[in-house]
Image: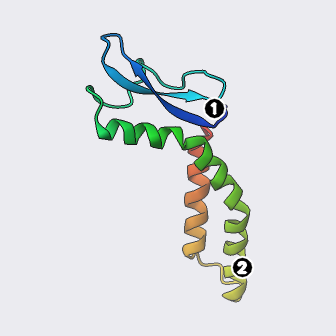
């Protein structure tokens, strides 16, 4: 599964009942969310705008996390070298697993 490429932005829209809400739009103009995918409650609440901002940042966050992955892996490996090849799990291992799981979830795996 491949998501719509970013960047995404928050845009104001009217729902079927002409209530103000927000949608997420890709750079090429496609709607990522709209009235069929409700970002928040009506009428437009600050929480709705915050949710929309978080959703619209997803492609950038995923790209940043993938960019950090090599450094996180290197840190985990280095921590084992400093521990004298200790095979016990440590915080770097847990962090690496957390990051890899988040990337997998975003990639639909």
Across and down, in percent, residue 99 comes to 59, 57
Q: Which residue is mark 2?
A: 78
Along the horizontal axis of the image, is 95 left or right of 6?
left
How crowded pointer 1 is (Cα within 10 Å; few <14, some 14-19, many 20+) is rated as few
Which numbered mark, 2 or 1, is in the foreground of this view? 1
Q: Nearer the viewer, residue 73 or 6?
A: 6
Q: Nearer the viewer, residue 76 or 68?
A: 68
The span from disc 2 to disc 1 (Cα, nearest Å) is 33 Å
How crowded pointer 2 is (Cα within 10 Å; few <14, some 14-19, many 20+) is rated as some
- Does residue 56 lie above or below 23 as drawn? below
Q: Which residue is mark 1?
A: 3
Residue 3's quadrant in the figure?
A: top right
**At x 33% / y 22%, what residue is drawn?**
20
Callout 2 touching callout 1 (CB < 8 Å):
no
Quadrant placement of the N terminus: top right
Residue 40's quadrant in the figure?
A: top left
Mark 2, secondary structure of its residue? helix
Across and down, in percent, residue 48 comes to 34, 36
**At x 73% / y 84%, what residue is drawn?**
81
Along the horizontal axis of the image, is 94 left or right of 83?
left
């Amino acid at each position: 599964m491949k998501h719509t490429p970013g960047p995404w932005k928050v845009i104001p829209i009217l729902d079927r009942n002409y209530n103000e809400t927000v949608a997420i739009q890709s750079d090429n103009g496609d709607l990522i969310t709209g009235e069929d995918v409700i970002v928040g409650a009506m009428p437009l609440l600050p929480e709705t705008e915050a949710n929309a901002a978080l959703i619209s940042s997803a492609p950038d966050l995923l790209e940043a996390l993938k960019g950090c992955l090599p450094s996180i892996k290197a840190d985990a490996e280095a921590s084992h070298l400093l521990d004298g090849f200790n095979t016990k799990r440590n915080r770097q291992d847990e962090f690496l697993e957390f990051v890899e799981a988040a990337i997998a979830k975003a990639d639909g795996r």
